[in-house]
Amino acid sequence: MKSENNYQILKSQKTKLGNPIELISSSLFTLHSSLIIGVFHGDEPQGKFLIEEYLKKSPKQNLLFIPCLNPDGLELKKRTNANEVDLNRNFPTKNWELTEKNEFFGGETPASEIETQFLIDIIKEYKPKLILTLHAPFKVVNYDGPARAQAEKISEIIHYPVEESIGYPTPGSFGTFAGIERQIPTITLELDEICPVEDLLKPVHQIFDIL
Ligand SMILES: [Zn+2]
């Protein structure tokens, strides 16, 4: 059966370099839907491709997507955004701190970045019941907050081990912001970057289907 690509842009924001960040869904009834986010880090492009391919076939109706949170980093082929900030250290958590300027720099102030603010606003407005972020290259299903059961289901599909994110400090991380401090089940799926990205289509789309 042929499907219609009737998804729509619910929200859009221009970045420093003028690239759009978009929130997309195929449904208008998106309150408490799961939210899937690609390209937190510009040098991890897999998520955008995997989400866009999913939207081309017959997407599950009640999911929210940000295919590319960091289009400037993607354009510049680097981890950070155009301001040299690691978005995954820029969230206003209790443990946010001003750090030295390296590739994990968390910004001059918490939530200083357009990309961070865009995502915070979406969480406030749409109250997702679960959040999945797509990263690379560690081949692990990492989780924060009450997400153990979902992380195990994802692990069964993609055959990466489950790991709770504890043990090393990640001040200002998205997992701490959403998962630990707001108790939204938050899963960080670290994909294989060695294998062709096409090989990830089947397992990752199966994962989207169960969220
Ligand atoms: Zn990453």
Image: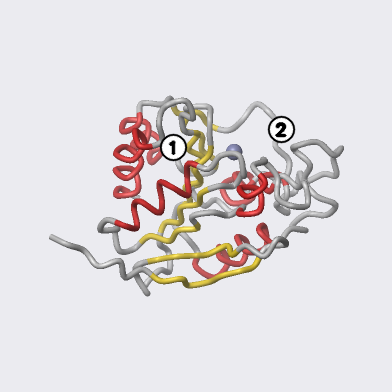
Q: For the residue marked with disc 2, what is the amino acid? A: Pro
Judging by the rendered image, the residue that carries numbered circle 1 is 148
Q: Quadrant of the N terminus?
A: bottom left
Quarter of the image for residue 64 reads bottom left
Extreme-left residue of the structure: 1
Q: Are marks 1 and 2 in contact (CB under 8 Å)?
A: no
- Which residue corresponds to the image point at 40% horizontal and 54% vertical from the top-left? 52
Q: Which of 180/168 is in front?
A: 168
In the image, residue 37 lies at what x, y percent? 50, 52
- Which residue corresponds to the image point at 67% horizontal and 57% vertical from the top-left? 116
Question: How crowded is the residue under tag 2: few (<14 C-alpha within 10 Å), some, or many (20+)?
Answer: few
Judging by the rendered image, the residue that carries numbered circle 2 is 169
In the image, residue 90 lies at what x, y percent? 73, 50
Quarter of the image for residue 20 reads bottom right
Question: How crowded is the residue under tag 1: few (<14 C-alpha within 10 Å), some, or many (20+)?
Answer: some
In the image, residue 15 lies at what x, y percent? 67, 63
Residue 39 vertical position relative to residue 12 in the rendered view, above or below:
above
As measured in the structure, the alpha-carbon distance from the residue carrying label 1 to the one carrying label 2 is 20 Å
In the image, residue 10 lies at what x, y percent? 48, 72
The secondary structure type at the circle numbered 2 is loop
